[in-house]
Amino acid sequence: STVKQISEAEQVLGHAFPRELVELFSETNAVEDVKGYLDVIWSLEWLVKTNLEFRQNGSFKELYKSFNNLLFFSDLGNGDQIAFSLARDKSLGRVYRWDHEDDSRVEIADSLREFINWWMKQ
């Protein structure tokens, strides 16, 4: 992805991306698992599409807490999503697993690098 594409995506979603994600998107547009089945990190286009869908879906607003403090960038293939925290507190930039069944948000990594290491152990 280009700097312009990243900047446009940030504008559409209304916030800056974590530095690690910007650096990754500056080098590649997605990261696949070793088998090529799942995107460990989604493409920039899919990231924007999915985050807009989660934030604007009327049914989701009734079922779940707000997603405005999360930036989804991956999923586990079972409905659970992976997101950076955008909260302006100690959780900023940490990686969380959102459970689609109970709306829980559990920290799984301190950084994108740690998340990728976590993913590879799954």
Image (cartoon, rainbow, N blue to C red):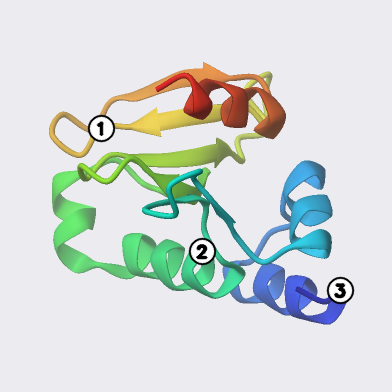
Give percent across and percent down for residue 97.
39, 30
Residue at the image point whose x is 20% and y is 56% from the top: 60
Q: Answer with mark 1 or mark 2, whichever residue precedes in sequence.
A: 2
Q: Secondary structure at mark 3?
A: helix
Picture coordinates of residue 2 (x, y %)?
82, 76
Residues under labels 3 and 2: Cα distance?
Answer: 16 Å
**Mark 3 residue type:** Val
Q: Is residue 5 above or below residue 97?
A: below
Tell which of 103 and 121 is nearer to you: 121
In this rendering, position of residue 80 left or right of residue 3: left
Left or right, residue 36 beside residue 94:
left
Q: Residues within 10 Å of mark 2 (few under 14, many from 20)?
A: some
In the rendered image, residue 27, in percent from the top left (x then y), is placed at 82, 61
Q: Residue under circle 2? A: 47
Three-letter residue code for mark 2: Leu
Q: Which residue is mark 3?
A: 3
Extreme residue in the front direction: 35
Q: Are marks 1 and 3 in contact (CB under 8 Å)?
A: no
What distance separates the C-alpha of mark 1 from that of mark 3? Answer: 32 Å
User: Viewer-proximal residue, 113 or 6?
Assistant: 113
State left or right for residue 9 relative to residue 119: right
Mark 1 element type: loop
* Label at residue 99: 1
Say what amino acid the circle numbered 1 marks.
Asp
Q: Residue at x 83, y 81 (%)?
A: 4
99 in relation to 4, above or below: above
